[in-house]
Structure formats: C-alpha cells, structure tokens
C-alpha cells in the first residue's frame, strides 16, 4: 500500500513538479511527496457516530460550489462487504445528477484498465486497486490542460454538484402527490435551485483491510487542469460543516415532513399478534438524510411495558427470523484472498440494530447502541431455512439452555445501554437484494407496516425473514429445546389488502 503522509506534512514538504509525461493521478497523488501536498484525506468515523451501523466506516468531506474548480476523489477498493459513494447537496440529500446521486461498489470502475474491482462477481480482493471520480462545480476544463495535468489515462465516474435535488419533496401547503398535512410556516422547497455546497460521503461496511487508507480529495484548477495545493483550498473543501454551504432550515423540514407520521402518515394494518409477535415493523420514509440508495430499513418501537421487565432482568428478548444468504466477503483472516462475490446471494449485507429513538424531538432523532451483522448469528448447518434465534439480555444473564450448542445466538446488551439514550427500538437493514429474492426489506413499501392479514392468514411482505420479537422469563421451558423457527409461511409474493392511513403511528426515525 502506498504511504500517505497526510495534511500535517504539507508545510514540511515542498510540492513536487508535475512530470509532463505522466497523468494527473500520478503527478498529484502517486509520485513521492504529491499526496502530502495536494491530497486532503476525508474525515473518518464509525457509522454509529451518525446514528448508523457501527460495523461501517463513514468517510466524509464538505464542499462549496465554485465553477473555477473541480474535485477529484481517489480511493483504494477495500477488503470489505460493501462500498458506496453519495454526493449530497445543501439539504443533505443526494444530488440529481446522475439520477440516483450515488453509486455502489460494483458500479465503480477501477481507475486504470490493469486494475480490478473486487466487488465484481468472481474477482478477488488484492491491495492497491484504485477507483476515482470527479465532481463538477459548474465550470468547464480548459481544452488545453498543462502538460502532466490530464486525466485521459484514467476511468472516472462523474458527478455534478450544481443544483438542488427536485425529487422526494414537497411543493407547498397541499401537494397532491402526498398526504401531507403541513404545519404553518413550511417553506417552499428549493426544487432545482442552485446548490451552494454539501457533502461527499463514502460508506464502507465490514472492512477487513489490513492497512486501510482514507479516500482523498484533490482540488483541480480548471483553467490549467492542475491541482491546487491543499493549503490553499479551505474555501472549497472542509472537514467541518459550513453554514453558508448547508441549508439547515430545508434539511430540518425534510426531517419533519418525511419522518413524522402526523404529517406523512403510515400505511397501517392491525397490530400483529400471530407467532407471539410483539413488534410492529414499518418501512422507513422515502427520504432519509444522506440517503444510501442500496439500503432499505424496517424498524419497530418496542412495547414499553415489556421493556420495563426486560431492562430489569426479569425477562430476555427473543428474536427469531430466517437469515438471508450473504456473501463470503470480506475474507477472514485478512491474509486469505480466495473469497469473492458470486452474485447469487439473497442480500449483500444484513444487520439488526439496537436503537434509542426520540419521537418527541423535532426533527426526531435515533441513536444506534449497537448492531449485529449477518456474520454474528449461529445457524444450524443442517437447517436449509437458516432459521436464527437470538436471545438478548439487558443484564448479562441468559437461560441455561440458550447456548450455541442448541443453535441460540446470545447478545449481552448491557455494555451498550446508556441512561441518556434508553433502548426502545430495533432496526433491520438489508443492502442490495438479489433480483430473485422478494423477501427483503425492499419488498415493504415506504411508510408501510410489514405485516398484514390476507384471506384470514397472518401474512407479511417479508414472510419468515421479518424478525418475530417476544419477551420470555429466564426459566421459560421453551429454552430447554433446541432453537427453531417461527413457522411463518412464505408470504413475500402475496397481495396485501388496502391499508389504513395512520397519523398517530410510532414510526422509528431513521
């Protein structure tokens, strides 16, 4: 892996001159001393710091739109489960160009033809495989770049940051396309307006890279095609938010309009009681701040009376579901490179999150306490359904029979409980479902309860893949037998009846 000296080394090391016979990437990043002068590493944090999955890494940087410049982002493909890029405008919403505003790993071409993308089915991870993309800030590159400042030898995706998104928005007091009941004072949305700035976000899940390097951004002067030293670009890129680049008012109204069922109602069915279910799972809104288009979420607020007993230690929480098949990437141990995607997995990534959600705040907030990814669960190798039974304790005490030998998965929530963020909700993530798999979280319509009754039978958009949650005493005789599934039928393809609009649903914020 190439050494990266970082921003701190800029003052101590002179910027190298570009080699007229090499390209932009070599001259301003790969050659000795170039990265320390020109490249600004993204800020790196766990996804949990942004209310997300703690098994993820979030690389982020903020930008201002200035047509004299262009952003060039370079990174190394990680040895991980999932990678995505999203360009967010001043509303913390993916930008409209390209249409999705984001790309996920297998859509990202390698930087050079001799490199490989490890997220293409059949490819194996190897170190030093790069990707790159450009972000237009409204200007045009000179037709005659300075020698050594051309990118014609590289393959890059291209984003545009010049305008505000126009989809998934409100247009005034009574938009016909939604059932909004807007509060007084709701502003008109800035559809298609000029974008002052925003953020770049790169997500990386289950990273096993032995020596991970953060992605970097290089600011390019369009009049010459060459890079600008990092010490001179604080008005263009920054590690911290800038109020003149971001529109907090519009972002907060997005949160209110799309996160509160009192404004945008939930499509509800009668509460589910079959299979001892004590949770009502609902798909998230169709707007989520800094959206990940490869992900879909269902979540539930847990019953307060059951939570009281659970947190006191008199009960444990039992969560049963059918675990979808997932890839064998990233390889473990880290030195083994033989695993690769097949393209036949049910979903790319799965996690079950334990959350603390505040429905009284405006906008509502949610804090991730912890999340269990798909590699955590005990699965009976003889069970073709891959049924999982998770037993969660708030005190560290578990039923004596709830062991891995009996195919139970134990999780001690105690180290993650915080008095300031009381545990009250669960959230389920699925990434990139296979086109042939119709039982993922993507199968549930936005704003809609997962469960329904069809022809008198308890059904659901996810069938047996939705978690069935109940609370049992530690001495329950049910734990003396090996773990088994709920017996839910495969109802993923069945037709749901018409739901009821519910303006009072306790929808977990995402």
Image (cartoon, helix red, strand yellow):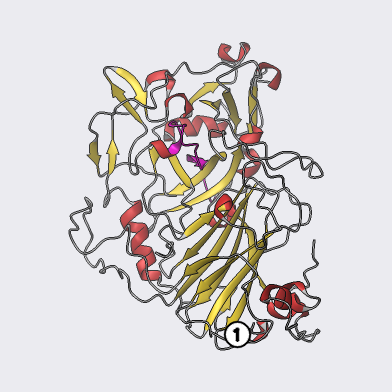
Please state if 98 lies on the left or on the right of 130 as rendered: left
- Circle 1 residue: 145
Quarter of the figure with residue 227: bottom right
**At which x and y percent is residue 144?**
57, 86
Mark 1 surroundings: few (<14), some (14-19) or many (≥20) residues within 10 A: some
**At which x and y percent is residue 327?**
63, 36
Q: Nearer the viewer, residue 157 or 212?
A: 157
**At which x and y percent is residue 98?**
43, 62
Quarter of the figure with residue 191: bottom left
Q: Magenta-highlighted stretch: main secondary structure?
A: loop
Residue visible at 64% across and 23% down in the picture: 379
Seen in the picture, residue 15 relative to 52 is either above or below; the reply is below
Seen in the picture, residue 394 relative to 139 is either above or below; the reply is above
Q: Nearer the viewer, residue 449 or 325?
A: 325
Boundaries of the magenta span: 420-441
Seen in the picture, residue 395 relative to 101 is either above or below; the reply is above
Residue 31 visible: yes
**Where's the N terminus, which quadrant?**
bottom right
Please state if 240 lies on the left or on the right of 261 as rendered: right
Residue visible at 35% across and 68% down in the picture: 250
Residue 300 visible: no
**At which x and y percent is residue 485?**
52, 18
Mark 1 element type: loop
Residue visible at 64% across and 26% down in the picture: 409
Please state if 178 lies on the left or on the right of 133 as rendered: left
Magenta segment includes 380: no
Seen in the picture, residue 375 relative to 480 is either above or below; the reply is below
Quarter of the figure with residue 252: bottom left
How many numbered badges does the structure rendering display?
Answer: 1
């Amino acid at each position: 892996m190439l050494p990266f000296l970082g921003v701190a080394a800029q003052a101590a090391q002179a910027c190298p001159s570009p080699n007229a016979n090499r390209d932009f990437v070599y001259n301003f990043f790969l050659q000795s001393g170039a990265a320390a002068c020109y490249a600004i590493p993204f800020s790196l944090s766990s996804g949990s710091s942004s209310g997300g999955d703690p098994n993820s890494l979030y690389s982020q940087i903020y930008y201002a739109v200035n047509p004299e410049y262009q952003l060039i982002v370079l990174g190394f493909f990680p040895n991980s489960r999932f990678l995505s890029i999203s360009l967010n405008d001043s509303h913390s919403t993916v930008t409209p160009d390209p249409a999705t505003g984001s790309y996920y790993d297998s859509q990202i071409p390698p930087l050079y033809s001799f490199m490989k993308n490890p997220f293409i089915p059949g490819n194996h991870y190897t170190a030093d495989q790069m990707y790159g993309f450009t972000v237009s800030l409204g200007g045009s590159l000179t037709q005659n770049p300075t020698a050594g400042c051309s990118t014609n030898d590289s393959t890059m995706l291209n984003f545009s940051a010049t305008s505000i998104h126009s989809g998934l928005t409100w247009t005034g007091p009574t938009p016909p396309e939604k059932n909004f009941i807007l509060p007084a004072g709701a502003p008109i949305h800035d559809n298609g307006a000029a974008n002052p700035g925003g953020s770049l976000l790169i997500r990386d899940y289950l990273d096993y890279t032995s020596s991970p390097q953060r992605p970097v951004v290089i600011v390019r002067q369009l009049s010459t095609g060459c890079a600008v030293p990092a010490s001179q670009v604080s008005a263009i890129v920054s590690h911290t938010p800038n109020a003149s680049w971001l529109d907090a008012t519009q972002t907060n109204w997005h949160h209110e309009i799309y996160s509160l069922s009192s404004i945008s109602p939930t499509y509800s069915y009668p509460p589910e009681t079959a299979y001892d279910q004590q949770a009502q799972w609902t798909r998230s809104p169709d707007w989520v701040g800094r959206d990940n288009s490869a992900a879909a979420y269902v979540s539930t607020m847990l019953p307060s009376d059951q939570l009281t007993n659970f947190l006191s230690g008199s009960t444990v929480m039992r969560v049963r579901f059918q675990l979808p098949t997932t890839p064998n990437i990233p390889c473990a141990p880290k030195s083994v490179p033989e695993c690769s995607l097949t393209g036949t997995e049910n979903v790319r990534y799965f996690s079950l999150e334990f959350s603390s959600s505040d429905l009284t705040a405006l906008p509502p907030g949610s804090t991730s306490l912890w999340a269990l990814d798909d590699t955590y669960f005990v699965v009976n190798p003889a069970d073709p359904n891959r049924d999982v039974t998770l037993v969660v304790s708030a005190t560290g005490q578990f039923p004596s029979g709830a062991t891995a030998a009996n195919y139970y998965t134990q999780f001690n929530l105690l180290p993650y409980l915080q008095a300031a963020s009381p545990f009250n909700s669960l959230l389920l993530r699925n990434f990139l479902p296979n086109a042939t798999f119709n039982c993922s979280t993507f199968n549930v319509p936005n704003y809609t309860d997962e469960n329904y009754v069809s022809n008198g039978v308890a059904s659901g958009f996810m069938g047996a893949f939705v978690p069935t949650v109940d609370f049992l005493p530690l001495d329950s005789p049910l734990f003396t037998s090996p773990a088994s599934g709920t017996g839910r039928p495969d109802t993923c393809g069945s037709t749901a009846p018409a739901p009821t609009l519910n303006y009072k649903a306790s929808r977990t914020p995402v």
